[in-house]
Image (spheres, helix red, strand yellow):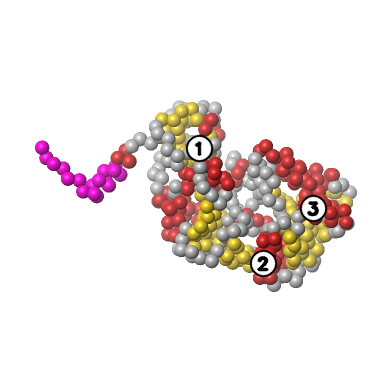
Amino acid sequence: MTEVSLTSERLIGLASSLTYICPMTKVFLRKKIAPRIANGHPWIYGNEVEKIEGEVVAGDIVDVYYSAEKYAGRGYINPQSQILVRLLTRKQETIDEAFFYNKILKAWEYRQKLGYTENCRLVFGEADELPALIIDKFNDYFVIQTLSLGIDKWKDAIVKSLESIFTPKGIYERNDVPVRGLEGLPQQKGFLSAPFDTTIQIIENGLKFYVDIENGQKTGYFLDQQDNRRAIQNIVMGADVLGAFTYTGTFEIHAAHYGAKSVLGLDISEQAVAQANKNAALNGLDATCKFEAMNAFDVLKQWGKDGKKFDVVMLDPPAFTKSRENIAKALTGYKEINLRGMKLLKNGGFLVTSSCTNLVNPEMFLQCIDQAAKDARKRIRQVVFQAQSSDHPIIWGMENTNYLKFLIVEVCDR
């Protein structure tokens, strides 16, 4: 009998080959659900699955099949989540570090083609075939959100890809978001590179802005409105402008830059107002553009009673709902603030208004504005209606990618 000696290298090779030939867990879809997946949607809910063959390990890669055993795609699974499987690819290809490198490189090449080279959303989740992954690029700094277990397991590979493609000055994770709890993940934030000063400067449309990527909302800055902020250029010239829900003052500072006579921004957060005033001073616009910490809901109502008037009113509120159960309340809220905004306008003034929740679709939002105008006894004329900037691409059939509504209307007395 011959004794066989296995070196550590051979053991590793044998383990790799065993892993390779080990059959992948198979998920089979119910027949009635299959068309939605076949039409391109990457989410598979638990109640859409007929059966599962093989071991289910949260975060692992699985193969998905239609009921007739036709191949549907490959993605990661998490039985703790309502979304059981998120598809990464429709091909039988290996999911490894090279896969994520190629996906991120493809996303970067797309942004470059569209002219988003300095500041942009580099990866927009499902729209870039990387479900639950958000990467924002601020010059040479990157902020990452891995919002599901399956994508979080590949965080090291994602960081390596960024380092290889960009040689960044810093990478930071903003995973301090409640949605991770639905995946059994903790909330956390911190450096994924060597530590750096997390208050950085960016340039947008020729203006400078401080970005607090550690403590600011979301990833520190709302890149999705960068194109929309240019849309106010002509209507604010020589105007008295009011901005409500201003956050760090980006719309208001653009208004001052574009020639507004006076600009007042309101936000309930004193921290946001302090940063907005710093941003105004950074651009030498603090004589024209002022910010105050006030409750915008109360102020809009009271100033309407007081008879205050502006040439332009800009409303950029946070999402009023994150659940379908509260859509009606959200629409009531949108209608109320827009009605109040219209009443503060001089005859022939302009209302600039947004909604950032995908649960309120474009048709619902426009109907809400129309009803607000009727109740305010105003006549409106649409100037601009558009979505988020193109570095946040919209995929038809995926409502979560078509979330931002941006509207400018002229408002006249009846």
Picture coordinates of residue 25, whole percent (x, y): 40, 34
Picture coordinates of residue 410, whole percent (x, y): 80, 53
- Tell me if residue 148 comes above or below residue 56 in the rendering: below
Q: Is residue 382 magenta?
A: no
| Residue 111 visible in this rendered orientation of the protein | no
- The N terminus: image quadrant: top left
- Classify mark 1: helix, strand or loop: loop
Picture coordinates of residue 315, whole percent (x, y): 74, 54
Write down the quadrant of residue 300 in the picture.
bottom right
- Tell me if residue 290 comes above or below residue 62 in the rendering: below
Who's the residue at 66% across and 42% down the image?
359
Q: Earlier in the sequence, mark 3 or mark 1?
A: 1
Write down the quadrant of residue 321 in the picture.
top right
- Residue under pointer 1: 80
Q: Earlier in the sequence, mark 3 or mark 2?
A: 2
The amino acid type, in three-letter code, at marker 1 is Gln
Whether tag 2 and tag 1 are in contact, CB under 8 A, the answer is: no
How much space separates mark 3 and mark 2, taking CA atoms?
25 Å
Within 10 Å of disc 2 (Cα), the crowding (few <14, some 14-19, many 20+) is: many
Write down the quadrant of residue 230 in the picture.
bottom right
Residue 91 versus residue 290: which sits nearer the camera? 290
Residue 413 versus residue 324: which sits nearer the camera? 324
- Residue under pointer 3: 298
Q: Give the label, 2 or 1, closer to the camera.
A: 1
Who's the residue at 61% across and 58% down the image?
216
The amino acid type, in three-letter code, at marker 3 is Asp
Who's the residue at 75% across and 46% down the image?
334
Within 10 Å of disc 3 (Cα), the crowding (few <14, some 14-19, many 20+) is: few
- Residue under pointer 2: 279
- Classify mark 2: helix, strand or loop: helix
The range drawn in magenta is 1-17
